[in-house]
Each structure stands twice: as C-alpha cells, then as structure tokens.
Image: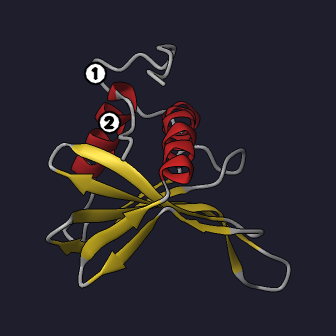
Amino acid sequence: MKAIDKTSTKILHHLISLTDNDKHLKLDNASPSFMAFNLECIWEGKAGIQWALSHYYLHHSGDMIPDPDMVVLQVNDEFFPIQYQDMYRFDEAVTWKDGEIESVDEAMQSSLAEFVNMWLRNIVEQQRVEIEGVDLKEESEG
C-alpha cells in the first residue's frame, strides 16, 4: 500500500497529538469561510489504528453530509488512506477478514493517498495550524 508523503505524515502526527482523551479533535478556526475539520480514532486492532478525517455540512434536509469523510490506517509511524466517502460515492480500497487486511485495490488506495496529501495541506492552511518543520509549499513526493 502507498503511504501518505512525509509532509502529510508530519501534519497528521501533529493533529493526532492535539486530540483529547477520547482521541478526538475538532478544528474550527476558519468558520464560516471553511468547514470545521474532525479527526477521531475509530478502531484499534492488530492491523493498526484507524483514524477518521472529515468535513461535514448540514444539508437542508437536516442530515449531516460528509464532504469528505476518509479513513486512514496508521501502522507504526505511517498512514495509509483506505476509505473515502462524500455525498455521491463511497470507496473502500481495503477489504477485511477477522480484523486483518484481506485485499487491497492498489490503484484506488494510491489515489486516496494523493488526495490526502493535498487535503491535509489545505486543512492546515485553512485552519491556520502552525506546525514546526512543515513547509506547505513542498511538493507531494508523489
């Protein structure tokens, strides 16, 4: 599987360090210009730790709509995007069996990694998060 790049890894480690005792973080430093960002630990097991990253907005129907909602798998110090959903689609790059990875759609998972690399940089910029040693202008390592 393709891990997110070094800059995005630093960003995500920093955001995780800001989580509360319930392993949850909400950043809302740019309202109303940008949606709040949420980070939450949703699963821990043999394969690693799953973190949900999301923006949500309130639809006129009253439903909270993901825009997007992603899941990344943390294995040691690396992060592997494994799931994406928004109002229009749901993509799961990994299938599971008994708490372990059974198969990976490599093309989809690689595409998710590229998206997360861009999205995390945008979140840090939009939410005005200062992270020592992170240059948002650095290109994704691709």
Cα separation between marks 2 and 1: 13 Å
Disc 2 packing (10 Å; few <14; some 14–19; many ≥20): some
Image quarter of residue 19: bottom left
Disc 1 packing (10 Å; few <14; some 14–19; many ≥20): few
Residue at x-position 27% and y-position 51%: 16
Q: Is residue 63 left or right of residue 80?
A: right
Q: Earlier in the sequence, mark 2 or mark 1?
A: 2
Amino acid type indicated by mark 1: Glu
Q: Is 64 placed above or below 53 here? A: below
Q: Is 42 placed above or below 36 here? A: below
Residue at x-position 20% and y-position 66%: 47
Q: Is 70 placed above or below 32 here? A: below
Q: Which secondary structure lies at badge 1?
A: loop
**Mark carried by residue 132:** 1
The one nearer the camera, 30 or 23, is: 23
Residue at x-position 72% and y-position 83%: 63
- Tell which tag, 2 or 1, sits nearer the viewer: 2
The image position of residue 50, as x and y in percent, is: 31, 65
Image quarter of residue 88: bottom right
The one nearer the camera, 64 or 27, is: 64
**Mark carried by residue 9:** 2
The one nearer the camera, 8 or 96, is: 96
Is residue 130 in view? no
Amino acid type indicated by mark 2: Thr
Q: Which secondary structure lies at badge 2?
A: helix
